[in-house]
Image (spheres, coloured by chain):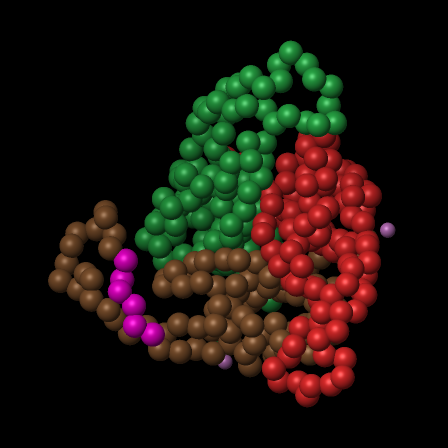
Chain colours: A red, B green, C brown
Amino acid sequence: MKLVIAIVQDKDANRLRSEFVKAGIGATRLSTTGGFLKSGNTTYMIGIDDQRVQEVLDLIHKTSRTRQQFMTPPVNIDAQMDSTSGYPVEVQVGGATVFVLPIEQFHQF
Amino acid sequence: MKLVIAIVQDKDANRLRSEFVKAGIGATRLSTTGGFLKSGNTTYMIGIDDQRVQEVLDLIHKTSRTRQQFMTPPVNIDAQMDSTSGYPVEVQVGGATVFVLPIEQFHQF
Amino acid sequence: MKLVIAIVQDKDANRLRSEFVKAGIGATRLSTTGGFLKSGNTTYMIGIDDQRVQEVLDLIHKTSRTRQQFMTPPVNIDAQMDSTSGYPVEVQVGGATVFVLPIEQFHQF
Ligand code: NI
Ligand code: NI
Ligand code: NI
């Protein structure tokens, strides 16, 4: 048994949940924010048998799309203003970050 | 020291918190959703000495009730319609899912 | 690679995020509540190379301030009323709780 923690973009979260449902995999969803764009992201926690870890990773990989997006860099109140402040730049967003954690005990009551 | 992650139904969450308070156990609460019913659930993170892990498990077990509940299965836009779509069915909800994780370092600053 | 889970007070959370950004450390933020005061707190999840774990701990430590605060103890409906109920008391709040977890796999898709 492993605990998989997957941080995905909000835009991919519902499709991933559908994939989990189709595969009969229970996933708990956490509201999270973070990353460079401060765009919303979603964290899933999945408890899964060792032999299905790769299947979970494959579902996450195929569901997590990278895409180009314009953003306005946040104004840092501590920083020197410079000529680039406030202008939107194109960045790559999306993808997923995944941790597979060992667990010592797993219980369902 | 272990990290206990407990996912419980919202209806059980406050009673469990009271049990933790009575036992002097600090628990951090995360807003989460998920599972078949998409009913709200709550995740607690508890850092606890090895010798108190069983006590924490017992508190979660005694506080987490299973109950019967009617639900209307979600309509899956990808799926073939069939005659059972849209009718409420009785399912068992409740219970708790618990992970006990090893930790390498624990700090309180 | 380690997974650092840091629970900090809301009041310290933005300064800590700035420190992470400055250091080029990606952190995912979870909305959490808990602790004696039920004051808001924030949980960060950080995936970090082993050799930078101490740097992350140092950033959390220097950013997490303890402070004195008045609180009114919650009224426990199960408890006997006594003369101290309802009066504000001064307590120390703040600080941070940090777990460093081993991980078996780390992926960025
Ligand atoms: Ni039971
Ligand atoms: Ni200190
Ligand atoms: Ni890829």
Identify which residue, B84 or B29, lies in the foreground.
B84
Left or right relative to C96: residue A74: right
- Residue span colored magenta: C69-74
Identify which residue, B97 or A82, lies in the foreground.
A82
Identify which residue, A90 or B60, lies in the foreground.
A90
Residue at 72 percent across and 79 percent down: it is A85
Q: Quadrant of residue B60?
A: top left
x and y percentages locating residue A66 in the rendered image: 81, 54
Residue at 73 percent across and 23 percent down: it is B79
- Residue A22 in view: yes
- Residue C50 in view: no
Identify which residue, B96 or A30, lies in the foreground.
A30
Left or right relative to A47: residue B96: left
- Of all residues, the one furthest to the left in this rendering is C83
x and y percentages locating residue A26 in the rendered image: 64, 36
- Of all residues, the one furthest to the bottom in this rendering is A80
Q: In this view, does B64 lie above or below B43?
A: above
Residue at 56 percent across and 72 percent down: it is C14
Q: In this view, does C31 lie above or below B11?
A: below
Q: In this view, does A76 lie above or below A80?
A: above
Residue at 68 percent across and 88 percent down: it is A80
x and y percentages locating residue B78 in the rendered image: 74, 27
Q: Quadrant of residue C93?
A: bottom left
Placement of the N terminus of chain C among the 4 image quadrants: bottom right
